[in-house]
Image: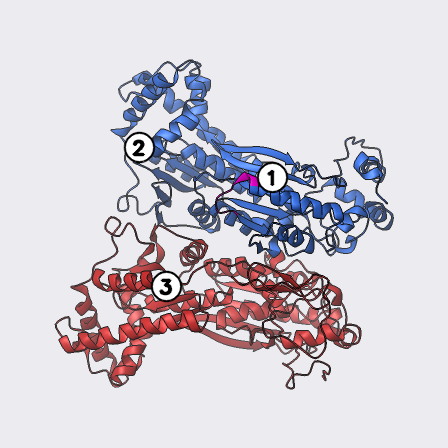
Amino acid sequence: MIIYKIPLSSHKFQYISGKFQIWNISKIPQTKFPENFRKSSRPQFTNCPTMIVMVGLPARGKTYISKKLTRYLNWIGVPTQVFNLGQYRREVLQTYKNYEFFRPDNEEAMKIRRAYASNALKDIASYFTKEQGQVAVLDATNTTRERRGVIINFAKEKGYKVFFIESVCDDPEIIEANTMQVKLSSPDYENYDKEEALVDFLKRIDCYKMSYVPLDEEKDRHLSFIKIFNVGSRYLVNRVQDHIQSRIVYYLMNIHVTPRSIYLSRHGESELNLLGRIGGDTGLSSQGQKYAKALAEFIRGQSIKDLKVWTSHMKRTIQTAEALGVPYEQWKALNEIDAGVCEEMTYEEIQATHPEEFALRDQDKYRYRYPKGESYEDLVHRLEPVIMELERQENVLVICHQAVMRCLLAYFLDKSEDDLPYLKCPLHTVLKLTPLAYGCKVESFYLNIQAVNTHRDRPTVKSLLCESE
Amino acid sequence: MTNCPTLIVTVGLPARGKTYISKKLTRYLNWIDVPTKEFNVGQYRRECVKIYKSFEFFRPDNEEGLKIRKQCALAALNDVRQFLTDEGGQVAVFDATNTTRERRETILRFAEQNGFKVFFVESVCEDPDVIAENIVQVKLGCPDYTHCNTEDAVADFMKRIKCYENSYQPLDEELDRDLSFIKIIDVGRRYLVNRVQDHIQSRIVYYLMNIHITPRSIYLCRHGESDLNIKGRIGGDSGLSARGKEFAKALGQFIQSQNIRDLKVWTSQMKRTIQTAEALGVPYEQWKALNEIDAGVCEELMYEEIQQKYPLEFALRDQDKYRYRYPKGESYEDLVQRLEPVIMELERQENVLVICHQAVMRCLLAYFLDKTAEELPYLKCALHTVLKLTPMAYGCKVESVCLNVDAVNTHRDRPSVRFTNTHPLSMSFLTVLLHRRHPLNSSVNM
């Protein structure tokens, strides 16, 4: 651990020892914006890199879990990447013939498979050492104790922690649904017709079944793992080692695959919106009230089963929900980003009174924290329980605010920290998100009620001094 | 959080930590504002059978014993019903062995009749050391064995466990696959979780999977006295005063003298806690969640100024200090919500020193010492004093260490007199006067 000592009396930075966290408490000169200027708001989750190793027969949801988990971990600020062996295979083989490649007696294929599996491990090592990754998800069947042994040895050598996620499912309906949703459209089966693809895929599964050795309560009692049975009706959790593994277990135990939709919308146009002022806690303008009514009609038109409605604690979202005439729940965590000293100012006023702050924000909009206020990074942290509960729920309408909606959207659509603060979330538009295959389908509904535009694009020329609207 | 009440039912042989889990879980749920109460059948039995003779009471062929035990269980269930239906309770923890399928069936029927959800928490443990330690820590001191010497007590208790062993039917993956439960194996080495139904059960599972019983201590203290403290102003983000810096040094020395193994140090993201930690010369972690309560429009004001500018707000705060939210600020209730991840991580950790702020420390202390929402905002957390909390039996031992560096007193007592026809404003004014008159504050420029 490196410690940089800068005297407290310096006007530039006050350094906080411990974990490369630098706290800017005073204005910095206009000429420089240092690269390693990070105001991170959260503690470290783990001290050494972690390998998450998926285990399970084909079509058990391993890739679904890998991608979802990776999306979640990246969103909460833990650099994570998936390493999918199927992808490695496709790069090596170019074309997929048929299931024979996976036959346990196919020596040549075995050699190839071991080779690209080993390449994946090398890439993981490189991800940890050269790219500052913290978690790598090895998405493959890993169905034999021998293969898992290889991975464990590799990790031990390098000093990585290992956590296994095994998905066990014997419900033929679920397996068929999986197969239909994601396998038949995979590059492997481009040249097959549906029926043939299904037949071939089932034979592929059979190839693995013979040698499949599931994680065992007794024999594997020294390993850290979670076994998920039948899409989450039961879990076996063994030896959770640290905070990040505990969070991963909690997350996996809260997600489900029941079809549902999440509706995201901002409050109706507010009085401060009309004045071009940010933050505050005003009520709806007359256009905003019209929107609330239109929203109610729209929701009724969607005929949604058991819809839950969530708002923040601020007047404008509550008033919007009131027009729906259904019960709703208020979450303080859904309150708009706190703009601190800039609350209720127009962008022009902020530029005039706090020019350096204004410029700094454009440099790193995700991490920049308003003086006495919050950053997008802080927002993500406070929205995490909302995301966790959204995962547990089924049909939900969330009436929130611009910055909040950007954070939630970034989670569902896997947007990076760079893109998040510039996502377009206009007033009077409802986004309907429906989980589909490995991602999320988005439908945008503009309810035809005029409103001001509150979006500021990413500045094209990064100048510290000038900002033109 | 949950629309119908939940009945948590413990399952397990004696000395498997059921009561420990029940009490800890109840404390946690109450702290996060879920009205919870535990119902310990052993207690009901002690009220019924005034004097405990010996393990023979628990023999499976003791008809009279069985009758009494069943009655006690039913009496407890009756009280559960009252708590959940009439008294606004949301979660009831039914703490008993519940080792037979038949007994569990009775409970399930009872819950169904009353519209309660049921979640079983089973503790399975075969490690003789753990069981022995349990017995020494909590059984020997219990009312049943006051008249016994240690050896006899242990012998009797082991025979008591035997009485249950033969008829014990653990929750089964197959036979009980339609029930909602968590099986905790070997004090948390392994868990089997089945059919979590809703949010509260999910939170309970998460909590149970994060707690441990490894001996450790948690040290709580505030930052050293700050410049704003001296001026009698609340909130803000100022640095340490000269005395505050002295405290930081004294804290460093104190921590070294305690010889704590693998101590983690946590601070907030405000200057005064960071500067305090800096003096320790060890790595520390900053948590935004540990920042002091946001006093909104009242930030950096003195209590007298708040009274002048916002007299009604000031009085309202005294009426319900826990739920009152400063305009554009936070309430203690909000604080508890934002501190929940800190508590969860404290549960996971071992030795930790948390350097925080007055309101924050009150919230954390209330969690460890099971204080109510009414008491929380008035807990005494003086500057320059370290509280050492060590989990013990069913609770927490507190040792208070004052590091002998002078500081102002920032505590405001609860308005002690409540006359219904006295204007609340004058009562609050009184507390401010008393605050100013405190010996440590009188020398300060206010």
Amino acid residing under circle 1:
Ala
Chain B representation colour: blue
Percent position of residue A189, x then y = 26, 81
Q: Nearer the viewer, residue A460 or A315?
A: A460
Percent position of residue B37, x then y = 51, 35
- Same subunit, tags 1 and 2: yes
Q: Does residue B189 lie above or below A400 as drawn?
A: above
Chain A representation colour: red
Q: Does residue A198 lie above or below B293 as drawn?
A: below
Q: Quadrant of the C terminus of chain B?
A: top right
Numbered disc in front, either 3 or 1: 3
Q: Is residue B38 magenta?
A: no
Q: Which residue is mark 2?
A: B128
- Rendering quarter of residue A408: bottom right
Q: Which residue is mark 3?
A: A51
Q: Which residue is mark 1?
A: B366
Write the start and end of the magenta stretch as one range. Answer: B257-263
Percent position of residue B308, x then y = 87, 48
Q: Nearer the viewer, residue B81 or B420?
A: B420
Q: Residues within 10 Å of mark 3 (few under 14, many from 20)?
A: many
- Rendering quarter of residue B384: top right
Amino acid residing under circle 3:
Met
